[in-house]
Amino acid sequence: MVVKTTADIEYITDYNSRQQVKAGPEEVEAVQPFSRRLVEDYGYAHDQLQTRPQFRIKSSPSGQEKYPVDIAVFHDARRTYDNLYIVVECKRKNRLDGEKQLKLYMGLSSAQIGVWFNGSEHLYLQKVLDSQGNVSYREIPNIPKADQRIEDIGRFTRCDLRKPTDLKAVFRDVRNHLAGMTTGITRDEALARELINLLFCKIYDELNTPFEKQVAFRAGVDEPSEHVKTRIAKLFDEQVKREYSDVFDKGDYITLDADSLVYVVGELQNYCILDAERDAIGDAFEVFIGPALRGSEGQFFTPRNVIRMMIDVLDPAPGEAIIDPACGSGGFLIVALERVWQGIDKLGSERGWSAERLAKQKADYATKYFRGIDKDSFLAKVTKAYMAIVGDGRGGVFCDNSLKPESEWDRKTGDKIELGSFDVVVTNPPFGSKIQVRGDEILSQFSLGRAWKREKGSFDWRPLEQLRDQQAPQVLFIERCLQLLKPGGRLGIILPESIFGNPSHGYIVEYLRRHTKILGLVSMPEELFQPYTHAKTCVLFAEKNDAPPKDFSMFMGVAKWCGHSSRGNTIPYDDVPKIAPRYFDLKTKRTLPHDRFGFMHRLSSIDNNILIPKYYDPDIVNELEALEGTHDLVTVRDLVDNHALAVSTGVEIGRLSYGTGVIPFIRTSDIANWELKIDPKHGVNEEIYERYSQKYKVKEHDILMVRDGTYLIGTSCMLTTVDTKILFQSHIFRFRVLQPDKLSPFLLLALLNSPIVKKQIRAKQFTQDIIDTLGNRVFDLVLPIPRDQATRRSIIEGTQEVVEGRASLRQKARQVALLVADKGQLSEEEDELVKTL
């Protein structure tokens, strides 16, 4: 699916016709995914489908073609009215409206099957004719594949199962249906447990059914719902639970009502879950749990493309001990297992091992070398079960708190996991501003559990004896991971970006510099864990080393796209798979362009203990270097040090002060397009203004620029004569030119809004708590000042014309407002109020 933008309208390429269509929610989330599913999952040929132009159904047998169908499916390539087989409607309606529309279209046409799909839920209907010619409709568990009859739905042999194209979308469909229709179970966690149990029935059935035999996990079109439930419940109780008695409890049962169970089985029965490219269990859990339950505990499940990138970089080999101390649903362990098995396959091929010996070696390696811990018992159970199904190793997964002292671990955990015994640690620990670890028992184990002190004016930190009152779990996990490693062992960990950039976290960077050789850092996009959290993260790769070299080159990369949007929908842009190949190319010193996908940076060139890769984006460096011949490259700090510029911030007055008067209080959202857009609801009274105006007084030609927020950082404006009686927020910088003869304020405004400076602002803004901030890194901005006098003069005159022209228009608006009341003069309060218009 290719997205193009024309005149602010987004278009996508229609999957079937290849025509450009408007990228509305209906197209992106329903029409295109279901078109793809019809071809890739159900086996229909492209020439059997019609999407664009839309096929139209007649209002009567002899009437005009009236009703457009989103997707029409024909028996064969003949797209004629009497050859219509399936109609698919993807309007964003509720289930009842969708059913009415399907019955209308099917009643007016030869279509035997109707599908309603709105991107998150579906309905499948069959038209039935009795011997008298009467028409009725019945719901069916699925639609037939291209080579199936309707009555063959659910009659699958093992070899009939197909690899799913988008299993997460299927799970989303199932979740939405169950949440709205299931009786007796409404919580996502309970629904997740049910689906997990059913998934293991499905996977067990795939593993143990011969290719030519009929699968047990099926729902036939004519099969009573209770029969389906009885068969699936028997499969779970008598086979799955018995095979994995250390995973499932005796009290675990399939409790879904029969109709809901048929819905789930009907959706999954076409697919071979074992062939899915993504972690089916992790996907299901992610969809079913959501942010409300898991987000509060800081658990955000890692997308599979990031897991693969991290495992590719760490490159675990057969015989290396691997652990994930916050294993969640087991994604890192599963992918690491796949990587190690590739090595065993190669070894077996070289040594001529039989299939039986190869399988035994894989199981032995999984059992001996793979370990996982999670403090959530259900997550530990999920990982244990999934490890068991894909190749054992379940005996190395434990429910415990990784951060507790080793002596406090459960005996089973302690028998299998020992500090300082692992070659590879890879993890995505829980993190969040609302979860903290407290208590001397845990904090006293860690240097990062202590208070640290930095000498004034220095970036050198040292730990104190005093323990902190609390510490974020992700910080303690850094040290615990290093404790688990052998000397020279390799760590891959996902951490909040703020750890590597905020001045208050400088002691964490100092700790890493003392105890590791940093192998690499990768900036990840904000969408990575959306829609569950907006947390901005980096991936750290490090080698445990208590005497690291004083200086070395480390790898850095910047992924701007991660394959899904902020809503969690798949998009065709993904930088993540490009990172690991570039890492190894640069590691072997091949001559490559240094761009955001990978570049090397010396430890000695790190600024102020900032380790965030996007801060050193080589694309920006290259662009600035290209300007050196024609521009003077001057930092904001240079201008401040030379007394040409003053930079300060505003004041916070408290919400209770809003609306007490008409004197504008400028917030970040009031700055746009080089001017103020004042909101009169936030005006303050004269008393509040007088209290703060001396310290925060503004002048004509001062520049205000947003310093904190999300998307507004860097937005700026210039104040004019009508803007000088204001207060402004602390999230805003004030730039005041002190030597206009050396630096025109109009030139400064243009420089701050130039593309290269905007890129720097985006690169230097980091997440702190829940918002992004530019902070003191504003002083590191490089301003490219043209040396050519004529160019500078043209920029100054053009900027001045814009600023003064807009000020003039605002003044004219005030004069027009006066005409309404036919007043030649206003009171001071009226005048201030009109200014805000």
Image (cartoon, grey):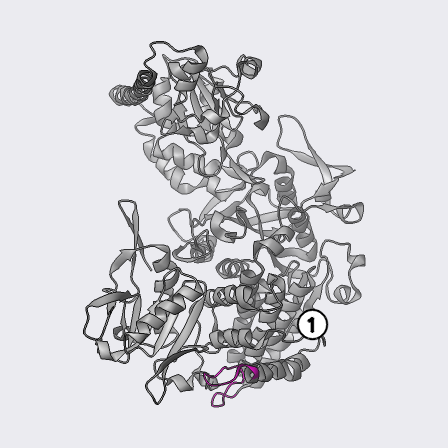
Whether 537 is among the magenta residues is no
Give the tally of numbered discs: 1
**Residue type at tag 1:** Gly
Q: Residue 705 falls in which quadrant of the image?
A: top left
The vertical placement of 462 against 703, above or below, is below
Q: Which residues are magenta?
A: 210-226
Residue 663 image point, x, y percent: 48, 18
At x 50% / y 25%, what residue is drawn?
A: 682
The vertical placement of 752 against 485, above or below, is above
In this orientation, does residue 353 appear? no
Give the SS element for disc 1: helix
Front residue of 346 and 406:
406
User: Would you name the residue on which mark 1 appears?
Assistant: 395
Image quadrant where one finds the C terminus: top left
Residue 340 image point, x, y percent: 56, 69
At x 58% / y 78%, what residue is drawn?
A: 201
Classify mark 1: residues with Cα within 10 Å, few (<14), some (14-19) or many (20+): many
At x 59% / y 48%, what residue is drawn?
A: 517
- The majority secondary structure of the magenta stretch comes to loop
Q: Residue 341 falls in which quadrant of the image?
A: bottom right
The vertical placement of 256 against 787, above or below, is below
In this orientation, does residue 402 appear? yes
Front residue of 742 and 388:
388
Residue 98 image point, x, y percent: 39, 66
The vertical placement of 833 against 79, above or below, is above
Image quadrant where one finds the N terminus: bottom left
**Image position of 481 (left or right of 13):** right
